[in-house]
Amino acid sequence: SHIKKYFPIQVGLLRRTVGHVKALDDVSFHIARGETLGIVGESGCGKSTLGRMIMRVLDPTEGSILFEGQNLTELKGAKLRKERRNFQMIFQDPYASLNPKMKVTEIVAEPLFVNGLMTRKQATDQAFQLMKRVGLRESDGERYPHQFSGGQRQRIGIARALALSPKLIVADEAVSALDVSIQAQILNLMMDLKKEFNLSYMFISHNLSVVRHLSDRVGVMYLGNMVEIGDKDKLYQGPLHPYTRALMASSPIVKRNQHREKVILQGEIPSPANPPKGCPFHTRCPQAMDICKAVKPALLEAVPGHAVACHLYE
Ligand code: SF4
Ligand code: MG
């Protein structure tokens, strides 16, 4: 709720803070159990920062992260570690997050015995079950990450993420580095696992069609702001925010099913170190009005289940 994240910008030898990059500027949303919230936006819009904050790898500058009624931002030490098991992350490049010196069974089993939940033997048995569940073979357990393809490595990352029986998995560009046919396999696996374990996903991607495939609801981010959020079908069939419309018009796959709208994104994304006053999108918005330069629009429900932050709908 109302999450803000400002990164200090430091220059020179004294590391004086000269300003703040507003990576996230008052973002609020919820994710329900068993639901997939897709987060789309161009690179640098704050979507990865948001994911890392939910994981509690980063602390918000302001605001709170509530989980089952508990404020995670107030937890520390053992309590925080225990709650953190409920959140796991899948990365774009699983190779970077898998220890190259460990065998696959060890990689998958590690979270279980490190957290003292099982003996090494029990954890190894459990690891084999998880490997089987994500489509790996028992003999794969004896091999090392570099011996696998990108898609297989992502399966290893997913098996490891599942080890602690998480409730929410944050996937940041989890299939973006894979070939399209492999992407589909991994997405289908993720959807099967979601049903089987009643998982929630926060699925972060710049790829609108991948997000559409997987999500129940979708949030659109621009310059650290959630500018539109709603049920997937409502958002894709009737995007409200001028930025969302422009994104969709420039996405070849989405465009095919839609009446073509001539919205071309003009100009550069402003620097998050010096964001525009008023609506963050006003410097590029074809429909900008006077009020847009002065007053920042709030994210308000335009129709039930579909909210937008834009003065056109107030
Ligand atoms: Fe465009 Fe104004 Fe809406 Fe911002 S508030 S998206 S500038 S119309
Ligand atoms: Mg990113």
Image: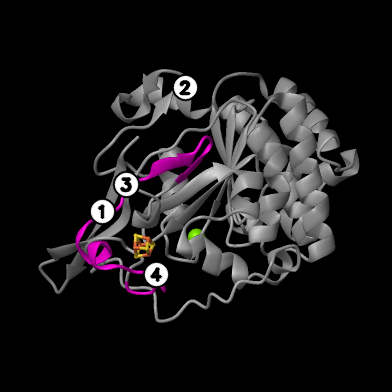
The answer as to whether callout 1 falls within 8 Å of ligand 2 is no
Q: Are marks 3 and 2 in contact (CB under 8 Å)?
A: no
Q: Quadrant of the N terminus?
A: top left
Q: How busy is the neighbourhood of tag 3: few (under 14 within 10 Å), some, or many (20 plus)?
A: some
Q: Secondary structure at mark 4?
A: loop
- Magenta residues span 283-307
Observer-side mark, 2 or 4, equals: 4
Q: Indicate the amino acid at tag 1.
A: Tyr
Up-down relation of residue 30 to residue 262 (above or below): above
Q: Which mark sits nearer the N-terminus, 4 or 3?
A: 4
* 267 or 309, nearer to the observer: 309
Q: Indicate the amino acid at tag 3.
A: Ala
Residue that mark 3 sits on? 298
Image point (32%, 63%), residue name: 280
- x then y, percent, for residue 230: 54, 43
Image point (78%, 66%), residue name: 179
Q: Indicate the amino acid at tag 2.
A: Lys
* 44 or 18, nearer to the observer: 44
Q: Secondary structure at mark 3?
A: loop
Q: Indicate the amino acid at tag 4.
A: Gln
Residue that mark 1 sits on? 6
The answer as to whether callout 4 falls within 8 Å of ligand 1 is yes
Q: Which mark sits nearer the N-terminus, 4 or 1?
A: 1
Observer-side mark, 1 or 3, equals: 3
Which disc number belongs to residue 287? 4
Is residue 296 shown in magenta? yes
Q: How busy is the neighbourhood of tag 4: few (under 14 within 10 Å), some, or many (20 plus)?
A: few
Q: Are marks 2 and 1 in contact (CB under 8 Å)?
A: no
In this picture, residue 60 sits left or right of residue 124? left
